């Protein structure tokens, strides 16, 4: 990881009965693809089976690779 300080970082939690919604806000100027990947891996490992992931099955592997590339271009 680079020694870069973000300008904006905010983590909010909203509780709804048996569900907790977490929202992470981060400035795009210093955000990296590596940071996104590490955050997702951490959440998946820490919350394991408790994590609800938005996925409706509409995307195949090729689409996901393209979206990753597009996000990488945005972050450049």
Image (cartoon, rainbow, N blue to C red):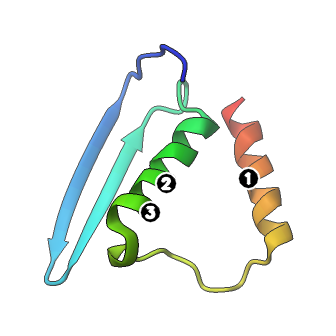
Front position in the image: 57 or 7: 57
| Tag 2 and tag 3, C-beta contact below 8 Å | yes
Give the residue at mark 1.
Answer: 68
Give the residue drawn at x 47%, y 74%: 53
Position of residue 53 relative to residue 13, above or below, is below
Quote the CA–CA distance across marks 3 and 1.
18 Å
Instruction: Give percent across and percent down for residue 59.
Output: 74, 78
| Tag 2 and tag 1, C-beta contact below 8 Å | no
Give the residue drawn at x 13%, y 83%: 17
Quarter residue 14 falls in: bottom left
Residue farthest to the top?
Answer: 3
Local secondary structure at mark 1: helix
From the image, state whether disc 2 or disc 1 is nearer to you. Answer: 2
From the image, state whether disc 3 or disc 1 is nearer to you. Answer: 3
Front position in the image: 9 or 43: 43
Quote the CA–CA distance across marks 2 and 3.
6 Å
Name the N-terminal-most of marks 3 and 1: 3
Position of residue 17 relative to residue 32, above or below, is below
Position of residue 72 relative to residue 58, above or below, is above
Instruction: Give percent across and percent down for residue 11.
Output: 27, 46
Q: How many marks?
A: 3
Q: Is residue 38 left or right of residue 52?
A: right
Quote the CA–CA distance across marks 2 and 1.
13 Å
Give the residue at mark 2.
Answer: 40
- Res 44 label: 3
> For the N terminus, which image quadrant?
top right
Position of residue 37 relative to residue 44, above or below, is above
Give the residue drawn at x 53%, y 37%: 35
Local secondary structure at mark 3: helix
Instruction: Give percent across and percent down for residue 57.
Output: 67, 86
């Amino acid at each position: 990881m680079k020694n870069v300080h973000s300008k904006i970082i905010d983590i909010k939690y909203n509780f709804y009965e048996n569900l907790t919604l977490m929202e992470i806000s981060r400035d795009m100027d210093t955000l990296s693809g590596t940071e996104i990947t590490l955050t997702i891996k951490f959440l998946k490992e820490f919350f394991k089976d408790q994590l609800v992931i938005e996925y409706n099955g509409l995307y195949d592997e090729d689409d996901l690779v393209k979206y990753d590339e597009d996000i990488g271009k945005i972050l450049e």
